[in-house]
Amino acid sequence: MDTNTIKYSLRKYKLYVIFGPIFKSIEVIFELFTPFVIRYIIDEGISAGLENNYLRIIVPGIILVLMCLLSFGFTFVCQYLSSVCSQGFGTDLRNRIYKKIATLSSLDLEKIGKGNLLTLISNDTNRLQLGIANLIRLAIRAPLLVVGSLIMSIFISIEAFLILFIAVIIIAIPIILIFYFSSRQILKVQESIDKVSSLSNDDLAGARVIRAFNKEEYEINKFKKLSNQYYKDAKVNQTLNALVNPITYLVLNTAAIFVVYLGRDNIFANVPLSAGSLTALIQYLNQITTALIVTFNVVIVLTKAQSSRERVNDFFKIVPSIQDGSITNKDIEYDENELVKFENVSFKYSDSEKNVVNNLDFSIKKGEKIGIIGGTGAGKTTIIKLLERFFDVTSGKILFKGHDIKDFNIKTLREQISLVSQKTSIFNGTIKENVLMGKDDISDEEVVEALKEADAYSFVFKYEDNINHEIVESGKNLSGGQKQRITIARALIKKSDLLILDDSTSALDFLTDKKIRETIASKKDLTTIIISQRATSLKECNKILVMDKGHIVNIGTHEELLKNSPIYKEIYESQVNTHG
Ligand SMILES: Nc1ncnc2c1ncn2[C@@H]1O[C@H](COP(=O)(O)OP(=O)(O)OP(=O)(O)O)[C@@H](O)[C@H]1O
Ligand SMILES: [Mg+2]
């Protein structure tokens, strides 16, 4: 069974979906009888003078109050059921979407777009939630009230029914017309607000990049255009909305006059309708009008929910481009000379014209410290993305502990690798939580130890609340270097087989950088890949890969490379000269 569907999320709440409308229907019955009781009070009580008013006014009055209380009770239960159901459903769906996102590769996510993902979790889920709440509360109630009111009028008299029927038609035509136009408009508004929120989400996510590339003007214009479209669509919609109430009351009152006119000089029969019957009919007319408006609103809400439903279902249908492997064992026997092995690996991003990395061939021994150096865009980070299986190789093979990484369960593979990525990711929460990232079998002492190793404790211990210090807005109150050190501590505490530092010390001063490198060098068993633009940071590595335009151009130790690699020599000398 596919657990990734909206239907599946709703199955859990089957009983709510059945019993909610039942309770609401019972409430409708009370509502339908109310005009009847009022009719009795008017015709038998008030019109009959003051005799017997106990039986004819007070008793039915009490009945009216009781009916009111009961109907309140049933409504309350229905509202409760629908709230629990729709909120539960929404939370469930959001979790499911989130879970699905986790199965998708970076490539898949890039294709969908961050803005669209946020729209799925927020707008679309909210709309579905609202749709379900409406379905339970109103979808049965409103039509039932219309049909019920018409049927009840038959019990007054056939003529009363005919009069009410004509009045309903007088009311229904303009309401249908207004809703026909406004529903189309509402969907248009919906589309434009989706576009606006999707674009602004993307822009917020990439704000720094936009600024870095001087694309502000282009993005601002794009946003302005969408935003103006939204403004225009919304304006028409608001105008139509503003018309709904006055027009409805105009036709309702006109129809009421018709009821009184037709009923008083009963044109269908000789006997005029009583004052009580007329009052009851006008009340039914009121109920029907409200119900009609509600019905159309429900239709609009459901139409919106339907388009969200399609989007959510389409999202669930996406087949992850990276398929999970079956190896879940981390302690496998392997040749320690080849913890990692790249065999003729080439890779091309879906939107790039040629390969970003070409024929990569190298292996890493257990415990080795490997450096990767090369100009920006050389393909260094791409190597890591391939090793962690954020993307799959285009050709060639990557082996980890002797197995093709495609054969590993992705979670198992990633558990064995600690990555401090180039882009530091700090989350809202305490420093401790940021270091632990969900691990719960680690003591505070170990957290402090990892922070010390990453040279982060020097600023953490200054906080009064120490490692429980709250980081706000994804690290806005931390410097770039402080963030880097926290992410290094996070990687160290993970205790995996392979540690990767992707330009992770770029924001650190030379001394701190050195201190961290020494700590790592002292961990003899910890295999480490250090990517850096600074040759000095890689000097002590057992092996350095020099990359240029997607190729490994040289491999060797610092000394060897100084002799054999013109590119390395050039990088080193330019840096030593500027620093020295
Ligand atoms: N998601 C992507 N889609 C398309 N092309 C990409 C993507 N990510 C990177 N590239 C391209 O791949 C090439 C290699 O990028 P990569 O990030 O591996 O470089 P790098 O060596 O890590 O550079 P830096 O030192 O600046 O971090 C670059 O030309 C880059 O433009
Ligand atoms: Mg990089």
Image (tube, helix red, strand yellow):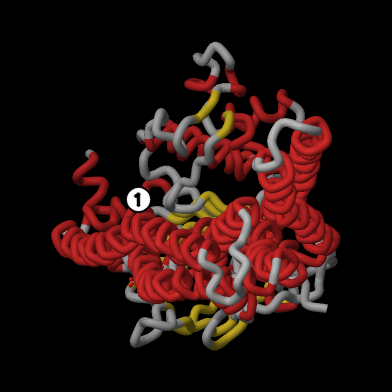
Query: Residue 170 falls in which quadrant of the image?
Result: bottom left
Q: Nearer the viewer, residue 380 or 163?
A: 163
Measuring 58% from the left and 63% from the top, which residue is drawn there? 288
Measuring 23% from the left and 67% from the top, which residue is drawn there? 229
Local secondary structure at mark 1: loop
Residue 421 locus on image (x, y percent): 49, 53
Q: Quadrant of the N terminus?
A: bottom right
Q: Which residue is mark 1?
A: 534
Measuring 49% from the left and 75% from the top, which residue is drawn there? 169
User: Is 329 drawn above or below residue 504 in the view shown?
Assistant: below
Residue 177 in view in this figure: yes
User: Is 74 drawn above or below residue 473 in the view shown?
Assistant: below
249 lies left or right of 8:
left
Query: Residue 257 falls in which quadrant of the image?
Result: bottom left
Disc 1 residue lies near ligand 1 with CB under 8 A: no
195 lies left or right of 398:
left
Residue 22 locus on image (x, y percent): 81, 60
User: Is 91 drawn above or below residue 266 in the view shown?
Assistant: above
Count of numbered circles in the view: 1
Residue 70 locus on image (x, y percent): 80, 42
Residue type (three-letter) at the residue carrying disc 1: Arg
351 lies left or right of 66:
left
